[in-house]
Amino acid sequence: MLRYSWRFTILALGITSICCAQTLREAADRDGILIGTAVRPPQLSEPAYASTLAREFNIVEAEDAMKWWILRPDQATYDFRQGDEVVRFAQAHQMKVRGHCLVWGRYNPDWLTQSHFTTQQLSQLLQEHITRVMQHYAGQVFAWDVVNEALDENGAVRDSLWYNQPGIGLSGQGKDYIEQVFRWAHKADPHALLFYNEAEGEGLNRKSDAIYAMVKDFKRRGAPIDGVGLQLHVPALDADIPAIAANIARLAALNVQVHITELDVSLPVNANGLPRPEDLTRQADVYRGIVRACLNSAGCTAIQTWGFTDKYSWIGSHSRGARGHALPFDRAYAPKPAYRAVMEELSAGRSPAH
Ligand code: XIL
């Protein structure tokens, strides 16, 4: 009888440790998936921010700290202080770091956009930037958004500093400039995973078709690309989840990884800044659907939200106060229904087929 009860106790303990992760991070570790968030360095010294971040996530990305306008206050200077803070926090808490972003037509410093550089100067500046930044973070940043938002809603290459205003010398040649910078990035850090990151090309539409075609072409010709980042700033509660799942599946079938990079689901707010209570439930369903779509595709290897607490989210300023409450934790760091939905899906794991 004594023997039996010991065995029972051991069995019970075993079951408890198999079941029931207590945090997103624990659940994600069991699935072999990365769960992360964008972070703002000044907030890392706020105890509730730091403890929630370290407890719940196994990957971080700098929300702004590795963009040109922070890294490059002037042409002669590389200011890695904020980015380094993110990396230090991650290392102290055994988290991975995604880098964001090396090439984007927006959020560039004035000295860069207003100096009327020639294509040759710009080409040199960009290659030097990519090389210097990637080498600084080599071994610390495992994956980079090399190019961000280069396509328009029709899938055409957007006008931009790097493409044709004046561009790096490949103006009018479609996606050649994108391929060129991926090649520079691969040379700078051959071990980093290289991603193309995009907004509003997550479901099935002309933009996602163009991303798909570009990745297929790059892979066929051996241009170095390892993944596609789907931003997923979702402004609608009727998001087409099956279309997102289908897009993830077709990208994964090209043998690239898919990362969900900037997930948030913003809600309309009333004059007091509050959402409708029923919208919080619908928001949770959107989070659930997206997490499930990722888990069901073996090629989908990371899910990141764009911030984690409603206390700090770009949505408020971006929507001029019309929307908010987009993230899984509220302003007091209490988990919302969206958090519980993500937790349930991560705990249920990948689909049996994988
Ligand atoms: C946003 C940040 O959240 C803001 O803090 C900043 O002012 C502007 O950029 N797509 C991207 C992100 O790839 O870099 C953007 O981040 C949000 C949209």
Image (cartoon, grey):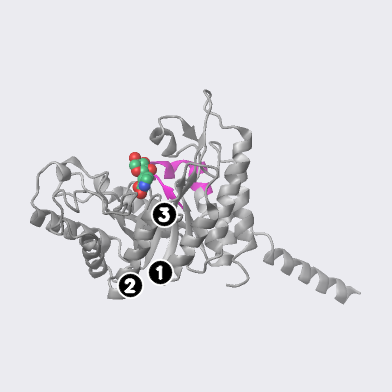
Mark 3 lies within 8 Å of ligand 1 (Cβ measured): no
Q: Amino acid at mark 2?
A: Lys
Label 3 to label 2: alpha-carbon separation? 21 Å
Give residue 219's mark: 2
* Residue on which disc 3 sits: 205
Residue 194 position, x and y percent, is 33, 65
Which one is closest to the eye, mark 3 or mark 2? 3
Q: Amino acid at mark 1?
A: Val
Q: Is residue 48 magenta?
A: yes
Residue 301 position, x and y percent, is 48, 64
The reply to whether residue 265 is visible in this rendering is yes
**Is the residue under label 3 in contact with that under label 1 (CB below 8 Å)?**
no
| Left or right: 340, with 84 as reference point | right
Q: Quadrant of residue 224?
A: bottom left
Give residue 256's mark: 1
Start-end of magenta stretch = 37-52
